[in-house]
Image (cartoon, rainbow, N blue to C red):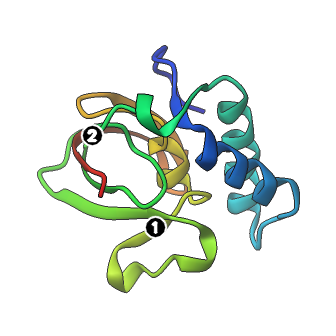
Amino acid sequence: MQTTNTQLVLRLDDYKLLTSYLNNWYGNTQVERKSALDLQAELKRARLVDKDEFPSDTVRLNSRVKIKADGREEVMELMLVMPDKADMKERKISVVAPVGAALIGFRKGHRVSWQVPAGKRTFTILEVINE
């Protein structure tokens, strides 16, 4: 669960796609199932907007994102995708993966915390590219 008090902002089309997908998906592992449940809870509290109102620096499906974990020097660059498009070799991470679920709906500069398999991590969103 994210610890920031910032409200998520989601595009209505992404919200519909994600909720439809999650309502019919049960995950392959316990970690994925927990992450999916946490993501569903986050989606329920999100502010939904149309494409025209969506802030360009906010993480959505197919966003390219640069993040940095607290306490680490490495900057990770990834693309947030639906689970069937995930491919770590191409740095495409599933929105249902713990890090993916943590990022969606947050903006550049936000710090988000999420429980990942290695423990609780806090990430700073350095850059968001939406094409």
The spot of residue 54 in percent (x, y) is: 42, 33
Q: Name the residue under label 2.
A: 125
Residue toward you, 61 or 25: 61
Instruction: Residue at 42%, 61% (x, y): give it.
Output: 62
Residue toward you, 15 or 106: 15
Instruction: Residue at 76%, 48% (x, y): give it.
Output: 19
Instruction: Specify the quadrant of the image occupied by residue 103.
Output: top left
Instruction: Residue at 73%, 33% (x, y): give it.
Output: 41
The spot of residue 46 in percent (x, y) is: 61, 26
Instruction: Specify the quadrant of the image occupied by residue 106.
Output: top left
> Residue reaching furthest left?
73
Distance of mark 1 from mark 2, alpha carbons? 15 Å
* Residue kind at label 1, given as amino acid type: Ile
> Residue 93 — which label?
1
> Residue reaching furthest bottom?
89
The spot of residue 30 in percent (x, y) is: 76, 62
Task: Examine the rendered structure and indicate whether residue 94 appears above or below residue 11.
Answer: below
**In-image side of 6 versus 63 (left or right):** right
Instruction: Residue at 46%, 81% (x, y): give it.
Output: 87
Task: Examine the rendered structure and indicate whether residue 91 appears above or below residue 71.
Answer: below
Q: How crowded is mark 2: few (under 14 residues within 10 Å), some or many (20 or more)?
A: many
Q: Is mark 1 on a helix, strand or loop?
A: strand
Q: Quadrant of the N terminus?
A: top right
